Amino acid sequence: MVTLKDGRVFGSRKLIWAAGIIGNKLKGLPAEALLRGNRLQVDAFNKVEHVQDVYAIGDVAAAKEEKYPDGHPQVAQVAMQQAKRLAKNFQLMAKGKPLIPFEYKDKGSMATIGRNRAVVDLPNAFFKGRLAWWLWLGVHLFSIVGAKNRIMIFINWVWNYITYDQSLRLIIRPFVRTKSN
Ligand SMILES: Cc1cc2nc3c(=O)[nH]c(=O)nc-3n(C[C@H](O)[C@H](O)[C@H](O)COP(=O)(O)OP(=O)(O)OC[C@H]3O[C@@H](n4cnc5c(N)ncnc54)[C@H](O)[C@@H]3O)c2cc1C
């Protein structure tokens, strides 16, 4: 049975739940710096607006670019690119040189929906299926920090692939029908 917030209750065999994310509020930052979802409004150099010497990158930061008036998408690519740019800007700052504004380069998207199934959507190409799945695995594996982590995850994946063990990705328990439900 599904119970909605407004009290309505109905039966359903399938339930798809889509949840968003919200940032933790940090004490000491003014309310004007907070945007939708508690994202911190930052300028093109990732400095939080209305305060001095405070910087934010990734999901919690909302920088408005012409192409992204509501802030960049909350994906890992943005966080990684902003981290690199900000690190470089800190070095420039220390040398007293002009800073370089952040500009997001969308390298495309990938998603997997299971074993041997994925989609790859690049700026100049779109493909799906087994090749897309292998590419998804490779890109994600090489994005993992540290050789030890990478090897451990690779061994886990190979094990899961051979044994069909999906327990790591399951966050629900099997539904057992009883007389009461
Ligand atoms: C279910 C799910 C699937 C996703 N799939 C993809 C995907 O396929 N591809 C993709 O590109 N992106 C995906 N994302 C988004 C991606 O995970 C984020 O965009 C990315 O992790 C942002 O990096 P970040 O460093 O900004 O934040 P995070 O990776 O969230 O890191 C923030 C860290 O800060 C810590 N933290 C929070 N509050 C405090 C506090 N008060 N004090 C100290 N530490 C604190 C958190 O514990 C966390 O470790 C997914 C996100 C979710 C939730």
Image (cartoon, rainbow, N blue to C red):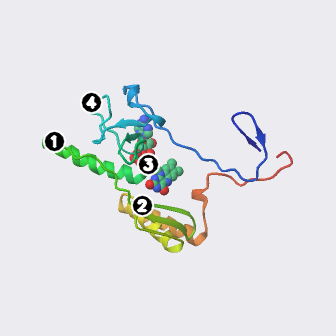
**Could you tell which of marks 2 and 3 lies nearer the N-terminus?**
3
Q: Could you tell me the amino acid type at mark 4? A: Gln
Q: Nearer the viewer, residue 36 or 17?
A: 36
Please give the label number shown on residue 162.
none
Q: Is residue 124 found left or right of 54 in the rendered image?
A: right
Task: Report which residue position mark 4 lands on.
Answer: 52
Which element carries disc 4, helix, strand or loop? loop
Task: Report which residue position mark 3 lands on.
Answer: 73
From this view, report whether residue 105 is shown above or below residue 119: above
Task: Report which residue position mark 2 lands on.
Answer: 108
Task: Report which residue position mark 1 lands on.
Answer: 94
Instruction: Residue 78: give x, y in percent of width and height.
Output: 38, 51
Q: Residue at x 68, y 52 (%)?
A: 173
Establish whether ligand 1 lies closer than 8 Å to the Cβ of label 3.
yes
Quadrant of residue 59 in the image?
Answer: top left
Q: Nearer the viewer, residue 5 or 68?
A: 68
**Could you tell which of marks 2 and 4 lies nearer the N-terminus?**
4
Tell me whether the residue at label 3 lies in contact with that at label 4, contact meaning CB atoms closer than 8 angstroms. no
From this view, report whether residue 120 is shown above or below residue 172: below
Distance CA(mark 2)–CA(mark 3): 12 Å
Which element carries disc 1, helix, strand or loop? helix
Q: Residues within 10 Å of mark 1 (few under 14, many from 20)?
A: few
Establish whether ligand 1 lies closer than 8 Å to the Cβ of label 2.
no
Q: Could you tell me the amino acid type at mark 2? A: Gly
